[in-house]
Amino acid sequence: MARTPSSEAHEKVLEAAIQLIGERGIESASMDAIARLAGVSKATVYNHWKDKDALCVDVVNRLRVAPPEFRSGDPKRDLLSLLTHLAQANRSARMHKLLPRIVGYAAANPRFAEAMKRNSLGPIESQILRILDEGVSQGVLPASMDLQTGLLLLLGPIMYCRMTRGKVPPNLAAEVLERFWGKWP
C-alpha cells in the first residue's frame, strides 16, 4: 500500500524529532529544526501535531512496546505475567537514549508529564487496575484494598529499577508479587 504525502511527512517528522531529541533534548529541539531536518514546512508539522508536547508523546508511543493483555482468569498469574513482561521487556536503543531527556522534560513540565502518563503508562495502569479489580471481585484480594495503592506497590519497584539501573533483577517481579500478595489473608 502506497503512503500518501501526508503520511510520508508524518513519518519524516517523527524520525527527525527522534534524532533531534536524542541529540539536543526536547527543550533544544525546536519545531523549526525538526521541520528542517524532516524536509517539510513548519505548517506541515503543525497540521499533524498541535504543539511540541503532542509530537513528543507520539515519539514515545512510536518507540515503546505495549504489553500484551493478560486475561487467564487468575489475577495472581496475570499480575505475575504482566510484571515479568514489564521487567524483562527490552527497550530499544533509541528509546534508551531518549528516556532520560523525556523524564527530565516531564519533571519540569507537569502538563507534558500528565500527557505521558495518560498515553504511555495508561494502558499498563489500566491493565493492573483491571486485574486487581478482578482479584477483589473473586475474593482473593480484600474489598477494602485501595486499587491505586496496589498499582503503586506493584509497579513502583520495577519502574524504579528500569529508570535507575536500566534493567530489573531477574526475580524482582515474582518477589514483588509474593510480598504484595502475602499481605492479604
Image (cartoon, rainbow, N blue to C red):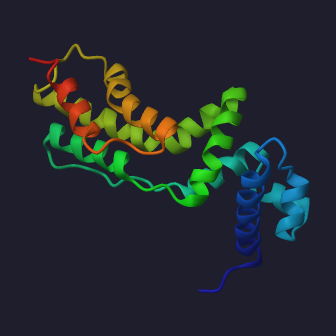
* Left or right: residue 47 compared with residue 125: right
Q: Position of residue 104 (x, y in %)?
A: 68, 34
Q: Quadrant of residue 28?
A: top right
Would you place residue 80 above or below residue 64 in this image? above
Would you place residue 113 above or below residue 38 in this image? above
Q: Quadrant of residue 117?
A: top right
Q: Position of residue 16 (x, y in %)?
A: 77, 63
Numbered circles on residues, count: 0
* Left or right: residue 134 compared with residue 17: left
Work out whether residue 95 can be spotted.
yes
Q: Of 63 and 146, which appears nearest the observer?
A: 63
At 29% from the left and 36% from the top, the residue drawn is 130
Question: What is the quadrant of the C terminus in the image?
Answer: top left
Work out whether residue 62 can be spotted.
no
User: Extreme bottom residue here?
Assistant: 1
Q: Of 177 and 133, which appears nearest the observer?
A: 177
Question: What is the quadrant of the N terminus in the image?
Answer: bottom right
Q: Position of residue 7 (x, y in %)?
A: 70, 72
* Left or right: residue 70 compared with residue 37: left
At 10% from the left and 25% from the top, the residue drawn is 139
Q: Position of residue 174 (x, y in %)?
A: 21, 38
At 75% from the left and 72% from the top, the residue drawn is 6
At 16% from the left and 24% from the top, the residue drawn is 141
